[in-house]
Image (tube, grey):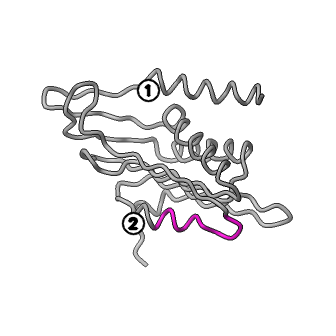
């Protein structure tokens, strides 16, 4: 079997014993992925629902045409941050399996950037955990994004709306009612 650079950044976790922790798969990679295969792989024993999110490169951002989006990361640290985000989701909801794939390199309008998939015994937990994971990927995982437009290039920063969403999740943990 030929191993690509993507295989080097895969992280799998499965614990044996009385309690079975969620199957977690994390990959930060330049290669594209198949959303259908990734979603189907989450339908493990006990699954009652799978929810997924697919992020793609915008054609326009802040009233400018996007020609290219360059994504970079800090190897090792980024995967650890994603692992922590998934573990937080696990502590809130019934997560049987979770996959996060985030691409790096030069991507173009319409290209897939990120896949988040969550399997649970019930759909509500799968929906909530998936939304939580993607919301915190936007604010806690170290990715640098440089956008190229016809007129210039610019580094993107975290949007205030993303920070507000993350704050709302944190507040809901402090006060679950």
Comparing labels 2 and 1, the label whose residue is closer to the camera: 1
Question: Is label 2 in a helix, a strand or a loop?
Answer: loop
Q: Residue furthest bottom?
A: 1
Please state which of residues 77 and 81 is positioned toward the viewer in this rendering: 81
Q: Residue at x 35, y 54 (%)?
A: 30
Locate residue 50, reporting x and y percent: 58, 58
Q: Quadrant of the C terminus?
A: top right
Q: Quadrant of the N terminus?
A: bottom left
Question: Is label 1 in a helix, a strand or a loop?
Answer: loop
Mark 2 touches mark 1? (CB < 8 Å): no
Q: Residue at x 24, y 46 (%)?
A: 108
Locate residue 135, reporting x and y percent: 53, 36
Locate residue 84, reporting x and y percent: 64, 43
161 versus 141 height, above or below: above
Residue 163 in the figure: left or right of residue 65: right
Locate residue 132, reporting x and y percent: 59, 39
Magenta span: 37-47
Q: Residue furthest left?
A: 150
Q: Is residue 34 magenta?
A: no
Q: Which residue is mark 1?
A: 158
103 versus 136 height, above or below: below
Please state which of residues 101 and 60 is positioned toward the viewer in this rendering: 60
- Tell me which numbered mark, 2 or 1, is placed earlier along the sequence: 2
Q: Residue at x 39, y 50 (%)?
A: 103
Badge count: 2
What numbered label is drawn on residue 56? none
Q: Which residue is mark 2?
A: 4
């Amino acid at each position: 079997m030929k191993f690509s650079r993507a295989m080097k950044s895969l992280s799998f976790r499965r614990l044996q014993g009385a309690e079975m922790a969620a199957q977690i798969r994390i990959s930060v990679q330049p290669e594209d992925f198949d959303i259908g295969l990734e979603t189907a792989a989450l339908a493990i024993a006990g699954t009652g629902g799978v929810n997924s999110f697919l992020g793609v490169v915008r054609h326009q951002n802040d009233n400018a045409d996007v020609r290219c989006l360059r994504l970079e990361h800090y190897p090792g640290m980024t995967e650890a941050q994603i692992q922590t985000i998934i573990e937080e989701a696990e502590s809130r909801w019934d997560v049987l399996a979770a996959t996060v794939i985030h691409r790096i390199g030069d991507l173009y309008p319409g290209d897939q950037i990120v896949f988040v998939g969550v399997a649970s015994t019930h759909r509500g937990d799968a929906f909530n955990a998936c939304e939580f994971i993607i919301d915190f990927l936007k604010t806690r995982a170290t990715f640098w994004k440089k956008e190229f437009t016809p007129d210039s290039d610019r580094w993107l920063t975290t949007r205030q709306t993303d920070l507000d969403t993350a704050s709302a999740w944190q507040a809901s943990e402090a006060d679950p009612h």
